[in-house]
Image (cartoon, rainbow, N blue to C red):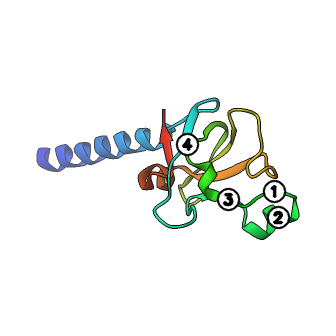
Amino acid sequence: MKRYFLAILAVFTILSMNAQDAQTPLVQVGDVLEIGSPDAPRYKHIYFPRPNFIIKKGGIANYKRMRGKKVVVTSVEEKKDGTLQIKIKRADGGKFFNSHTLVSVDLKNALESGELNVL
């Protein structure tokens, strides 16, 4: 009887620890991050607009110029599927590609792939 009780207690302790870790966000509103280089020709986890939308708004679709740009987190939202999505804006106050002010990011995957770096 004691073995079962200890096993159940251990399971609940581990589950509660994991639940607390999941609730702690990696970044907060106002944190400064840096855009890194993508693994592919385009960014996969930073949801930059497609080139035709950039051009329609009068911008220049040059993704290479985004490398090294400092960005500020404006909102943090956890989706229903458990992913952490943030919105970013440029730290210097400019627009991405001279056409878009805010961009959405899948935070966990962007950090893992090196598309986004914490300063």
Q: Are marks 2 and 3 in contact (CB under 8 Å)?
A: no
**Sequence-wise first label, 4 or 3:** 3
Q: Badge 4 is on which residue?
A: 68
Residue 81 image-quadrant placement: bottom right
The mark that comes first in sequence, 2 or 4, is: 2
Residue plotted at (45% across, 44% down): 22
Query: Mark 3 sits on what residue?
Result: 62
- Give left or right: position of 19 versus 79: left
Pointers 2 and 4 in contact (CB under 8 A)? no
Spatial distance from mark 2 to mark 3, Cα to Cα? 10 Å
Circles 1 and 2, Cβ within 8 Å, touching? The answer is: yes
Q: Quadrant of residue 69?
A: top right
Q: Residue at x 56, y 48 (%)?
A: 67
Query: Relative to the observer, which residue lies in front, 2 or 115?
Result: 115
Residue under pointer 1: 59
Asked if residue 40 shows in the view, the reply is yes
**Residue position marked by numbered label 2 in the rendering:** 55
Looking at the image, the residue that sits furthest to the bottom is: 52
Residue 97 appears at what percent x and percent y?
A: 75, 52
- Counting from the top left corner in percent of width and height, residue 7 is at 19, 48
Q: Residues within 10 Å of mark 2 (few under 14, many from 20)?
A: some
